[in-house]
Amino acid sequence: MDPLTLALIAFAVASFIAIAMLTLDTLKDWFRQKNIQATKSEVGFIYQRKMIEGNVKVLQGILNKAADTVTSTQGYDAKKLEDKVEKTLAGREIVLTS
């Protein structure tokens, strides 16, 4: 299954933490805590969806490509994204990280 489809499935069942501003440090810290190591079978992702209400839901997670599963996720319901996060996502729906 492609990464976007897996992210959409994870997004549908994730719980989201309400946050005033989502920062790049918050996203990086979560990946550090999970000790993600980019390999051929494991990759991090950040998925965003802008909501009609004006907020942005962001889901980050770890995708195990070999098992075709999302192994861990963290969701944020943000009123605003830090400029660094905006640049990282650059208007894309999903970004794969290493």
Image: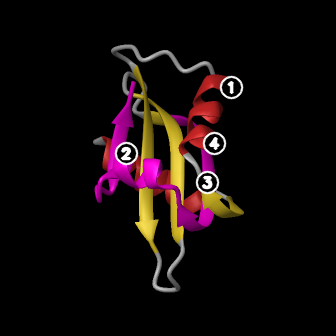
Residue span colored magenta: 70-98
Q: Which residue is mark 1?
A: 33
Residue 26, numbered label: 4
Q: Which image quarter: residue 65? A: top left
Q: Residue at x 54, y 21 (%)?
A: 36
Type of the residue with mark 2: Thr
Q: Position of residue 56 (x, y in %)?
A: 51, 68
Residue under label 3: 75
Label 1 – label 4 distance at C-alpha: 11 Å
Quarter where residue 83 is shown: bottom left
Given this view, does label 3 or label 2 mark the residue nearer the observer?
A: 2
* Above-or-below relation of 18 to 82: below
Q: Which badge, 3 or 2, comes first in the chain's sequence? A: 3
Please say if the residues under marks 3 and 4 sit with CB atoms less than 8 Å apart: no
As measured in the structure, the alpha-carbon distance from the residue carrying label 2 to the one carrying label 4 is 13 Å
Q: Which residue is mark 2?
A: 88
Chain-order first, disc 1 or disc 2: 1
- Asked which secondary structure carries label 4, the reply is helix
**Colouring:** secondary structure
Q: Quadrant of the N terminus?
A: top left
Q: Residues within 10 Å of mark 2 (few under 14, many from 20)?
A: some
Q: CA distance from mark 3 to mark 2?
A: 17 Å
Nearest to the observer: residue 4 or residue 36: 36
Count all numbered tags in the image, as a single digit: 4
At mark 2, the secondary structure is helix
Determine the CA span between mark 1 and mark 3. Answer: 15 Å
Which callout, 3 or 4, points at the residue further toward the start of the chain? 4
